[in-house]
Image: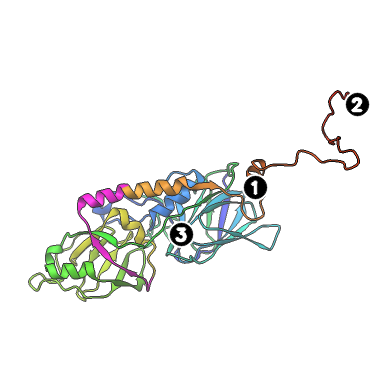
Amino acid sequence: MGAVLKILSPGVFSSLQDRGRLGFGAYGVPRSGAADPVSLRIGNHLLGNDAFETAIEFRFLGPKILIERGSVRLALAGDATADLFLSENDEAVKISPWQTVRLDEGDILSVMPLSKGATGYLALEGGFDLEPVLGSCSTYARAGLGGVNGKNLQQGDCLTARLDHPREMIEKIVKHPPRFGEEPLRVLLGPQDDYFSVETLGIFEASEYQISSDVDRMGIRLEGTALAPLPEKGSDLISDGLVPGAIQIPGNGQPIVLFVDCQTIGGYPKIATVITADLHHLGQVTPGNTIRFKVVTPEEARAALDEREQLIQQVENSVAEHFGEGFLDLKALYQSNLIAGVVNAKNSGHFPGHLEEGSHETD
């Protein structure tokens, strides 16, 4: 039986997430899945897992976890540090972001608040022993699907690892982690951009919007210049399909960017949709920050997806062995000039530990 991880404190909105439920929108089942699939992929890459292996996703503040039985290896993906309390030592060992760490029975890992962004991940080598629901282990708490009893992680929850014990390997760290939120979010206009005048579309692209405090996995409400539809169109329409990244304009004119747990249909006009290549940036937006939008063509959107894959590859290629604070870097040591012997000042021609030419003396 695999190792057991016990949740001592769940952190903020911690849940189990993978790629999500694809293909069930017609039945009213949201996609769910990782808020930031790029970070999830990198965390799993550090461990040699499949790219979208289920991991613990946390928002703003990570969980505190006890290894109740066995040993595991975890990867911390996101701009948060963690304190590792070893079972035989009350002092905390600081764990850097974007690295792996092995924990043994009795060890406790406590993840600190994120220094940048909103979402982080704790991936487990070999993954968790979970039963998929509709093809995914992702938690969708509103409908009680996936995860642990269909809920976000709670104090006292226990998670079982698939592996009996971690593989023998040197810990890894990402030397060049991904960056988020430095460019405008790229969007395709529509599907109801005809509800707005050319002038309003221009205002939408030229304006800067502040992220309100109303942010979760379902949607992100923005505050800024109100966008009014054409009088003959209005702010209501017959409900039609929604996808993550769709930007609705309700009656007050303040945009709502729908996210991974969004409903599958809605009745507000959608001025634009965030392109697939930029959706992961939405997982890192924080209240009070600002965002802008940039309209692109379908051809540019497809090219951006290829560019994102190249960037992920570059990040994965920057993964290196990590010995951590207090560890002896044997690899570096062996590559350095080492002392071959010592000289006795009274007998400068003699090198202890070396057989002298022609010597056949034995003890």
**Pointer 3 and pointer 1: residues touching (CB < 8 Å)?**
no
Residue at image mark 3: 120
Q: Nearer the viewer, residue 296 or 129?
A: 296
Residue 195 image-quadrant placement: bottom left
In the rendered image, residue 301 lying in the magenta stretch gets the answer yes
Residue 143 visible, this orientation: no
Seen in the image, is 357 located left or right of residue 46? right
**Residue 280 image-quadrant placement:** bottom left
Q: Is residue 160 magenta?
A: no
Q: Residues within 10 Å of mark 2 (few under 14, many from 20)?
A: few
Q: Is mark 1 on a helix, strand or loop?
A: loop
Question: Where is residue 35 drawn, in percent x and y?
Answer: 38, 58
Q: Which of the labelled discs sits on residue 329, or is there none? A: 1
Q: Give the amino acid type for the residue marked by disc 1 in the picture.
A: Asp
Which label lies toward us, 3 or 1?
A: 1
Q: Which amino acid does label 3 sit on?
A: Gly
Camera sees residue 273: yes
Q: Do the residues labelled 3 and 2 touch (CB within 8 Å)?
A: no
Residue in the image at 56% along x and 61% along y: 82
Q: In which quarter of the image is residue 293?
A: bottom left
Q: Earlier in the sequence, mark 3 or mark 2?
A: 3
Three-letter amino acid code of the residue under disc 2: Thr
Q: Where is residue 103 in the image (x, y as percent from the top left)?
A: 61, 52
Q: How is the image coloured?
A: rainbow
Residue 212 lies left or right of residue 235; in this view the side is right
Write the start and end of the magenta stretch as one range.
287-306
Q: Distance between the residues labelled 2 and 1?
A: 37 Å
Q: Which of marks 3 and 2 is in front?
A: 2
The x, y position of residue 223, in whole percent, is: 29, 75
Residue 57: x and y in percent read 45, 58
Residue where numbered disc 2 is placed: 362
